[in-house]
Image: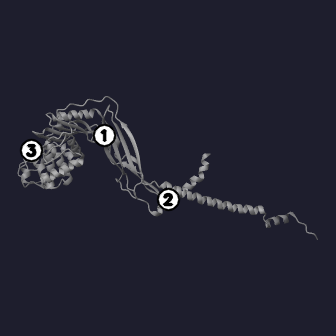
Amino acid sequence: MKKVYTDKDLDRRRRRKPSRLAKLNIRNWRLWVAGVVLLLVLLFFVSCLLTAADGNIGFSVSETTRQIKAPTGSKAAAPGVWANAAVLMDAESGRVLYDKNGDAKLPIASTTKMVTALVVREKTKLSDKVLISKAAADVGEESIGLTPGETLSVDQLLHAMLIQSANDAAYALAEHTGGSIKAFSDLMNKKAAELGATSSHFVNPHGLDAPGHYSTARDLATIGRAVMADPVLAKIVVTKTYSIPWPGHPGPRVAVGHNEILTQYTAANGIKTGYTVPAGWCLVASASKDGKSLIASVLNSSHRAADAIAMFNYGFNNTARIVFATAGQKLGDSRISSFPRRSVPVVSKTTMAALTFVGSTDVFQVRVSMQKKAGRSVKAGEQLGKIEASLNNSPLENGQAVAKTSKGHPNVLAGFVAFIWYSFCWTGKIIAAPFRIF
């Protein structure tokens, strides 16, 4: 009997033997999967290269520059002064605002004691005990009445020297600090040179006239600026009286100040007077007002306080304060590591500013340069760059750009994991790129 085939038999046969088209589709599917995997591997490899390139910023330095012009207006006329030599200086930047024979080398009397104080502060402690020698007690002229064999502290002698201009105190401090007057004078000359007071020379600590002992109004303003930058000395030079124990006497020795500027000018806060016949009346004065600080240096003037006041009024009333950077101001970031990306904020270490006269043609340039990549670890306060301020293309003031916080480099495992993650992120960006145009 002949077999009759039905539709079921045909379906069964089709299931048993796939067609060539079905075989081709299966093979294409496998090829497609292999192709996609290969493409993804290639994309990931490219992503790794891009990640490595993105993380390699080298040790280059980033720089930014900006200009600041003086405010417009009418420029005031400079004051007239009686002094043979005089200088008005911006205490913040060191810029000279007024100059009359500022570089003339002249005798300077007791303004010398500013350098003495700076050297003593650098080499000794305030609590150090000083044994008074006969030579110190016998130095002569202005004194606090020291006697051979007594002992006073460095702090007490600094007050006596700067307030009452005691020569015996200056001599005793010099012997204690340098071992001899000659050795101490060498320290004074070295300190002056460090400050930039290169037209000065000192042979004693008190300022009594001697061959080869001189300075200039410009140098003394520079030295006075350094005195006011020392908090201890700045506090002493504004003091009008100071009591020092005096064993064997009914009361203490009282150092009484000679600086008339402290009573004649409200904003005054220092610094040192001086007088000898060859030097004439000398004064290095300081004053602060309206966020500005000035140093006035006057040599050989019959009206030293009036000269200083005239220069102070000229400076305070006719200038504007130009701020280049403020302490803690963020300047940028410096990278510690690329995998993972870790940076430290870079800030200005101090406030930098300068005075300019209203109506002048002054043009300030401020250039900030900093490392784009720091070392493997950074400590707070570590210098990572610098701030350079110039006036009319001449250098004026320099400051430091420092790390705001401490930060260390990650370990190797964390770096590897971060690298892989960043590479995957790059892969995602590449895949998504064509769809961003829609």
The reply to whether discs 3 and 1 touch (Cβ–Cβ < 8 Å) is no
Taking the spot 71% from the left edge, 63% from the top edge, the residue there is: 27
The reply to whether discs 1 and 2 touch (Cβ–Cβ < 8 Å) is no
Of the image marks 3 and 1, the number of the one nearer the N terminus: 3
Measuring from the top left, give residue 65's x and y in whole percent.
39, 43
Specify the label residue 418 is tagged with.
Answer: 2
Taking the spot 49% from the left edge, 54% from the top edge, the residue there is: 54
Task: Give above or below for 210 relative to 153.
Answer: above
The residue that disc 1 covers is: 354
Please state if 236 lies on the left or on the right of 415 as rendered: left
Taking the spot 61% from the left edge, 49% from the top edge, the residue there is: 434
Amino acid type at circle 1 is Ala
Give the position of the N terminus as an image quadrant.
bottom right
Task: Give above or below for 235 relative to 41.
Answer: above
Measuring from the top left, give residue 139's x and y in whole percent.
7, 48
Amino acid type at circle 3 is Glu
The residue that disc 3 covers is: 142
Of the image marks 1 and 2, the number of the one nearer the N terminus: 1
Give the position of the C terminus as an image quadrant.
top right
Measuring from the top left, give residue 276's x and y in whole percent.
10, 40
Out of 137 and 366, give the one closest to the viewer. 366
The reply to whether discs 2 and 3 touch (Cβ–Cβ < 8 Å) is no
Structural distance between the alpha carbons of marks 2 and 3: 73 Å
